[in-house]
Amino acid sequence: MDPAVASGIWVKLLYAGLLSAVLLLLILLTQLALKSPWGRMMHAIRDNETAAEAMGKDVTRRHLQIFVIGSAIIGLAGAMMITQDGLMSPGAMHRCAIRS
């Protein structure tokens, strides 16, 4: 096998391992967060915002917190995608959406 091809395959396998590790870490952290008191508060806000606010929970702050956490996760995913692909253009995303 050509060394350049073997190197490319090796890099892609390592990157797949890194992606898997990050994904497993995110799943673990999400499950731990949802089972914590903070997660129970998020469930209470989801089920009934008015009741949660009546119990003294700052619903607006928690909504902002969830938005920021979600944005950080999406930013990490985008950074990993750009690292793998090397280039981001609107045309590339349009082609991905058509193939799906």
Image: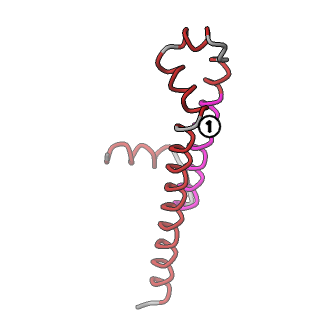
Identity of the residue drawn at 31% across and 46% down: 100
In x, y percent, where is residue 42?
Answer: 55, 26
Relative to 49, residue 16 above or below? below
Q: Quadrant of residue 1?
A: bottom left
Name the residue nearer the viewer: 97 or 46.
46
Q: Position of residue 85 (x, y in %)?
A: 52, 60
Q: Would you place residue 77 above or below residue 14 in this image?
A: above
Q: Looking at the picture, tell me which residue is in the foreground, 16 or 3.
A: 16
Indicate the position of residue 91 as horizontal and vertical percent values.
46, 46
User: Magenta stretch: residue 75 in it?
Assistant: yes
Residue 61 position within the rendered picture, expressed as x and y whole percent measured from the top left: 68, 22
Query: Most prominent secondary structure in the magenta stretch?
Result: helix
Give the residue drawn at x 57%, y 40%. Answer: 33
**For this view, does 99 lie left or right of residue 68?**
left
Q: Residue at position x 53%, y 48% from top?
A: 89
Front in this rendered view, residue 96 or 49: 49
Q: Is residue 62 left or right of residue 94?
A: right
Label 1, on which residue? 69
Q: Give SS at disc 1.
A: helix
**Residue 7 magenta:** no
Q: Residue furthest left?
A: 99
Which class describes the residues within 10 Å of circle 1: few (<14), some (14-19), or many (20+)?
Answer: few
Q: Which residues are magenta?
A: 65-85
**Vertically, is 50 above or below 84?**
above
- For the residue marked with disc 1, what is the amino acid? Ile
Q: Residue at x 60, y 49 (%)?
A: 76
